[in-house]
Amino acid sequence: MNIETLHPAPDTYAEYCVLCRGGPVTWTTAGGRREVRCGNCGGRSARAIVIDPGLSWWSAEDGEYWHETAAVFVRDPADRFLLFQRVAFPYALTVPAGHVDRDEDPADAAARELREEVGLTAGDRLRFVATFPIPGDSCRRGSDAHVWHVYLLTVPDGGRVTVNEEGEAPRWLTLDEALAADLTHAVRQVVTTCTEQLLDG
């Protein structure tokens, strides 16, 4: 998403319609999924352009809007990974993950997202896997490019977990099973790029 024409103030919270670049926008839930309605053009969309000074974001030289994401791949002894269905855009299977706050350490963000999204506490068991850019990773806040910080947490069993309001239907899948499912773009990229690291250790 190119935000050059919006001229966003980095320290001011703002929301814009992805269709007309106007506003105001209102977030609603329809059919169990979050969506946006624009008060300017009347359009509906699965996302808006959100400029949030509390998040780590930047505009690249070409105007592309970037965010940072911290993610935790939770693995059980059978090499199955915890995934759940997102109810906010993008509507696909994901792992516990979320935006990194401004000035937040990515490892702290990963532990926070893990706790907030699925109620698991990592303690000192988080293992760093990789950091890399993922162009084409679209989020509900209007960015189409994220730098992903990926971590691994091994748990003693693949038991039941409770997912917060951003997701539903948690399940444990092998990486092969995950690749055959409807994954978010970013999770698919991580699985195909980091298979060895996710299964090692």
Image (tube, helix red, strand yellow):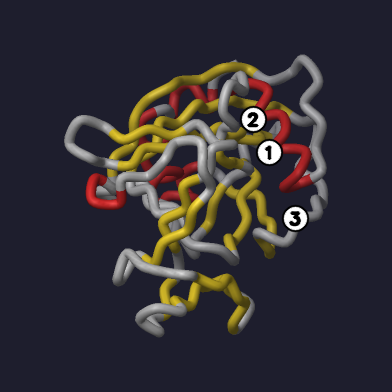
Q: Amino acid at mark 3?
A: Val
Where is residue 189, by image quadrant?
top left
> How far apart are the two marked residues, 2 and 3, measured between alpha carbons?
16 Å
Q: In screen coordinates, is 53 left or right of 161?
A: left
Mark 1–mark 3 CB contact (< 8 Å):
no
- Counting other residues with Cα less than 10 Å from the Cα at mark 1, is it few (<14), some (14-19), or many (20 or more)? many
Q: In screen coordinates, is 60 left or right of 169?
A: left
> How far apart are the two marked residues, 1 and 3, measured between alpha carbons?
11 Å
- The answer to whether residue 181 is seen in the rendering is no
Q: In screen coordinates, is 54 left or right of 92?
A: right
Q: Tell me the tag on residue 163.
A: 3
- The answer to whether residue 174 is seen in the rendering is yes
- Counting other residues with Cα less than 10 Å from the Cα at mark 3, is it few (<14), some (14-19), or many (20 or more)? many
Q: In screen coordinates, is 119 left or right of 179?
A: right
Name the residue nearer the viewer: 84 or 132: 132
- Label 2 or label 3, whichever lies nearer to me, is 2
Q: Tell me the tag on residue 110.
A: 2
Q: Secondary structure at mark 3?
A: loop
- Label 1 or label 3, whichever lies nearer to me, is 1
- The answer to whether residue 138 is above or below residue 130 is below
Return the x and y of residue 6 as percentages of the image width and height.
Answer: 30, 51
Q: Which residue, given by chain and number where applicable, does mark 1 sit on?
A: 113
Q: Amino acid at mark 1?
A: Glu
Mark 1–mark 2 CB contact (< 8 Å):
yes
Point 55% across, 73% down: residue: 26
